[in-house]
Image (cartoon, grey):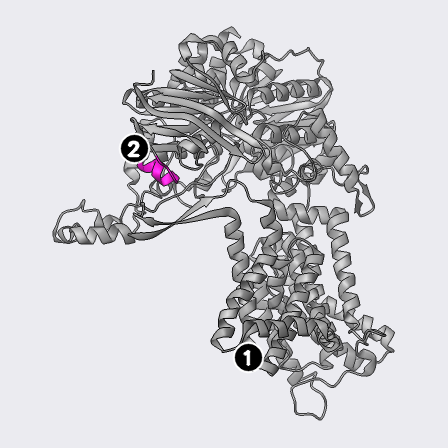
Amino acid sequence: MTEDAYVRMEDITKTFPGVVANDEVSLSIRKGEIHGLLGENGAGKSTLMKILYGLYTADEGRILLDGEPLEMASPQDAIDAGIGMVHQHFKLIPRLSVSKNIVLGMREPSARFRGDSDGLLSALTSARAVSGLARRFTLGLDEPETEIQSLADDYGFDIDVTSKVWELGVGERQRVEILKALYRDVDLLILDEPTAVLTPGEADRLFETLRELATEGLSIIIITHKLDEVNAVTDRVTILRDGEGVGTVETADVDADALARMMVGRDVLFDVDKEPVATGETVLEASGLRATDDRGIDALAGVDLTIREGEIVGLAGVSGNGQKELAEALVGVRETTAGRITLGGEDLTHASPRTFIDSGVSFVPEDRHVEGCADDLSVMHNAVMKGYGDEAFSDGPWLDYEATAEYAERLVDEFDVRGITDVEEITAGELSGGNLQKLILAREMVREPDLLVANQPTRGVDVGAIEFIRERLVEQREQGTGVLLLSEDLDEIFDLSDRILVIYEGEIVYEATPAETSRRRVGLEMNGGDAGPASRQVAVDGGHGESR
Amino acid sequence: MKLDVELTPREQVPRWMGYGTPVFTILAALAVSAVALLALGVSPLAAYRLMFVQTLTTSFGMTETIAKAVPLIFVGLAVYLPLKAQLWNIGAEGQLFLGAIAGSWIGVNVSLPGYALLPLMFLAGGVAGAVWIAVPAWLRAKLGINEIITTLLFVFIAAEIKNYLVRGPMQAPGANFPQTAQLPVAARLPELPVIGFPAGIVLAIAFVAVIHVVLNYTRLGFEITFIGANDEAAEHAGMSKLKIYTVVLLSGGAIAGIAGVSEIAGVQGRLRAQFAPGYGFTAIPIALLGRNGAVQVMLAACFFAVLFVGGSSIQTLLSVPAAIVDIIQALVILFLITAEFFKQYRIDLSLGERPDPGATGSVEGDL
């Protein structure tokens, strides 16, 4: 299998102080294949790919490209060698337009010097010496918008390339990142958890695109910890566990259970056991809710919503249809422009975030690092981010740091947050995605809220943590909390919800119980009920959707 | 062939770098300043010995240093406290002017015994400093207008108000100099018994202690720290940015105002038109050097006080321009910024072909 390898990484070892991130890992990628790199968070996937992308230098081992040893000191070398990477954390400039972001870093000379126009002036500007100078000293940001727009349309990315990146949702930003790499004409494309922010439909469209690209000879590596993704799109998959290569297998030869065992080292439960719970009194009632997004454009167009004790309400929708705004409005961090919110009969319309918190509302925000924690502060600080004013910790103006540290340790123990030696020393930013999410969940759940709003609680976390988080959500429901679950993972919505709502263009357009509806139907409703763009998506996952 | 400088993001910042930065910064600034001293034909070793050893071993030097340190500690705190919430109070100098104006007005016009007059002066100075920063604070907290610009611009307004007052309403009657009347003895800060240090140092240390305690042991301190670390998450957690921004900026202004009073009542004895010590600007490197805690701010302020006192002694004894102090001060800021950079990037130098310049990625994500 080594003869036809396009890229080979041989016996790569990389140690960080106290951690062996990669221990003699080997990987070979064929031309035109889609190769999955599977492992839990902290298994060493990202490290391995950062070595391949020139961000890290391996302590031992070598990289061969087309049989030639490849020395890379920086990502620039990787880009020159035709290797592109789409990172999990976006590298975009929010103030610039999509197309500007795409051409940025390409170092195109200014249009005047590109020699693509006729005439005397062009004869002068395309002269060798002039163009050499131009390449060095001018920067063409007058991007070929139409070209990029058609590229975006070709790949089925629903993006207006003239809009500014800050106006886009997380899912859309991810698409810009992928576009950026595609525009750069790479031979090997590394995608770091590309579907983490995509809806199932978008993910399927992306997979189709990737398959097309692969047929054209592009090699693709997908870093993932989602098993169904491996099955859906990859040709082969390499599994990493605790920094070691477990093996490479043909995807067709293995099933999800086998992959999960290789990845986690034990059997994993996929289905959450859910006891029926009698729903109690109404916890939250919202009526006619309207709010605007960060740009001041209407995002919610009169949402009516009721959540009762002991039920999980799943809110499905394509990213950017108002779910972020709805979640924020319901926990008091986004100002509403119309409508009423009552919690346990008490009117909380226009109340402060503090009032919502004190009334028993918990919130797991979409972006852990921006809204969920302060990366640079300790686990202890973040554990009591909301509860620091509670009687248990404070006496008059004083804050009892011994008590907060004890409390943080309790959360860490109860929610099995790993990677923490000392809650006052380790910062939130040092935790892996899954562990940070567990910490945030612990903070929001241990206070036994009446209402829990969880926006994408399992996004970007590994299988083990997903299982844990889902179980906790269900447990919380059994204790009588009303839960609003916003997720772009339809399986999650179907597995956990007692009721499913679909939001489309700022309105709740559909409501059903999981038993009386299907993934196909929900997928259709998410796209506004018209069968056009959604049909392909349903064709891909419709089958097993009906059966579960 | 070109010299190729390559920057690599550090995978991990070595711990010693965090603690070593202030020391490294100071040593590097002194080392580079040695070039200036050599250019003047002065032995850096002799100059530095005079600056530091002499200043710290004679009682005159110590008293002078403490006298300088007092206002520097105050203004250092006036910048440090808002900085904890990620706000830059660049205009401590202006708040200091207002404090000095209010303090000297009370000192000259109110007759009370010292134990009542001095506290009243400090109170008035604090209020005046807080009032002076109130507009930038309100603009920042309510409308999000950049406080760096507004606080700085308010310095110039404050300077002109001071210039007007000492030539007009507050000018000493019957005199032609642009200055107020001499403060009465009751309005002068006494010296400490036995050691003879200016009494202002006690107040300065008390403020250091209060701020240390507030930041490290109270809920307010928790909120300030959290808002400084991530204001968006803090708002999600129900903290009020409006409240914290107002509290830290007004407190910063008040402390700078108190610095003005301590300078007038402890050193100057009257407010003069040319009173423009520049402490409010020196406060910025002080707060940066000491940003790890109020006590560190105090140490940084003392270091700068030694520099100032030592600087004037080398000026008199070695005929070195006191501007050398400005040079060291500027270099400290430069090296602080550089040290920050070195903490995040590793630099490799090599000779060879230059690769195409372009975007380099940064390190994020899990292992």
Q: Where is residue B148 in the image (x, y as percent from the top left)?
A: 56, 60
Nearer the observer, A136 or A7: A7
The amino acid beneath tag 2 is Asp
List x then y, in percent, for residue B242.
66, 51
Give the label, 2 or 1, closer to the camera. Answer: 1
Which residue is rendered at x = 44% and y = 35% of the image?
A: A173
Which chain does tag 2 point to?
Answer: A
| Quadrant including the N terminus of chain A | top left
Can residue B187 be seen in this snapshot? yes
Compared across the picture, whether A327 is left or right of A357 comes to left
Describe the element under mark 1 as helix, strand or loop. Answer: loop
Residue A208 coordinates in the image, percent (x, y): 36, 20
For residue B130, the mark is none
The image's mark for residue B320 is 1
Which residues make up the magenta segment? A71-81
Vertical arrangement, residue A535 with respect to residue B335, above or below: above
Can you say whether A149 is above or below A10 in the image?
below
Q: Which residue is drawn at 18% across and 47% down?
A: A115
Q: In the depicted view, which residue is nearer to us: B30 or B237?
A: B30
Residue under numbered circle 2: A185
Q: Which amino acid does label 1 sit on?
A: Val
- Can residue A205 be seen here? The reply is no
Residue B194 appears in which quarter of the rendering? Answer: bottom right
**Residue for point 57% across, 57% down:** B24
